[in-house]
Amino acid sequence: MAPEVKGFFDKATFTISYVVTDPKTKKAAIIDPVLDYNPRSGRVATASADAMLGYIDEKSLEIVWILDTHVHADHLSAVAYLKEKLGVPVGIGANVTKVQAHFKKVYNVDTGFKADGSQFDRLLKDGETFKLGELEGRVLYTPGHTEACVTYVIGDAAFVGDTLFMEDYGTARTDFPGGSAATLYASIHRLYEELAPETRVFLCHDYGTAERKEYVWETTLANEREKNVLVREGVSEADYVKARKERDAKLDAPVLLLPAIQVNMRAGHFPPAESNGVSYLKIPVRKAS
């Protein structure tokens, strides 16, 4: 069965969020929603998430899940805001605990923060299923970009997070803590081998290319397998790892890396407010060697 999929593109972070609907029952899920954040002012806004809520209201949908594919490093997640509005559970891959444990140390987070995933309502394991009306969702563990990345397969659609990009752009970077080019190669080949070639693939990001100025975020596994510039059929693991590492070495850190992880590992919540009622985000500073 084919779900209806509506993508919402956030130009500020080149992120695509989705509302995925069972057309028969109108039950739906939100995947990878964006919370608007201005790093210059520290101000938060909800225009991106509110656009999704407007669509949900317009189509008379019943949201039953809010899902993140991983702890994003390039945008803040709106899962907490949307949970407050909709009162439905938030899910993420079970290995989020590995990411939490690492960054709890990086940010020297207070002892009140538990690296056990308890900030989320459901920790989804590899192979676990969930219902979206009459559609079945399935969780595939697809690490490599991070240790906790998952793909959500719903009907004939796969929501791959940062695992794959459009075939003319390649794949996710693998130089974040816990990332691995070899692991990502294996995860992508798992998608190639376990899912049907005609599976619709929905991406979490698109940046365009020098030749392609428009932003797009839907492809197929067959298209990726035949044409992906980094990991098409016939590219060996060794060749992919070499190409990926060379490309990663030239990439800048995402603009919102430092605030995003602190918020997203808390399921979209900011750190607890201090005595003046204001929440603060930390910036680790390392002395030059």
Image (tube, rainbow, N blue to C red):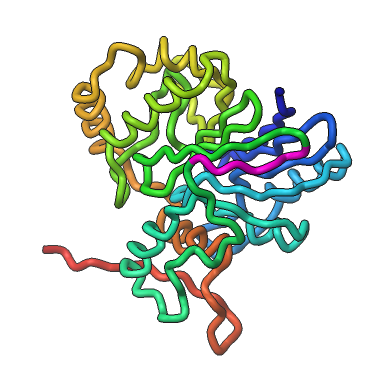
* The C terminus lies in quadrant: bottom left
Q: Does the image show residue 215? A: no
Q: With 59 as the anchor, is 154 left or right in this view?
A: left
Q: With 272 as the anchor, is 114 left or right in this view?
A: left
Span highlighted in magenta in the image: 127-133
User: Residue reaching furthest left?
Assistant: 289
Magenta includes 130?
Answer: yes
Q: With 44 as the anchor, is 169 left or right in this view?
A: left
Residue closer to the observer: 146 or 280: 146
The residue positioned 28% from the left and 40% from the top of the image is 180
Residue closer to the observer: 38 or 91: 91
Magenta includes 263?
Answer: no
Q: Is residue 36 above or below residue 272?
A: above
The residue positioned 74% from the left and 44% from the top of the image is 52
The residue positioned 48% from the left and 57% from the top of the image is 260
The quadrant in which residue 109 appears is bottom left
Q: Is residue 86 above or below residue 115?
A: above
Residue closer to the observer: 232 or 155: 155
Number of marks: 0
Q: Is residue 273 above or below residue 199?
A: below
Q: With 103 as the anchor, is 279 left or right in this view?
A: right
**Residue 45, horizontal then vertical, whole percent:** 66, 58
Q: Does the image show residue 286? A: yes
**Residue 162, horizontal then vertical, whole percent:** 46, 37
**Residue 15, horizontal then vertical, whole percent:** 55, 39
Residue closer to the observer: 22 or 266: 22
The residue positioned 76% from the left and 60% from the top of the image is 87
* The N terminus lies in quadrant: top right
**Residue 94, horizontal then vertical, whole percent:** 47, 53
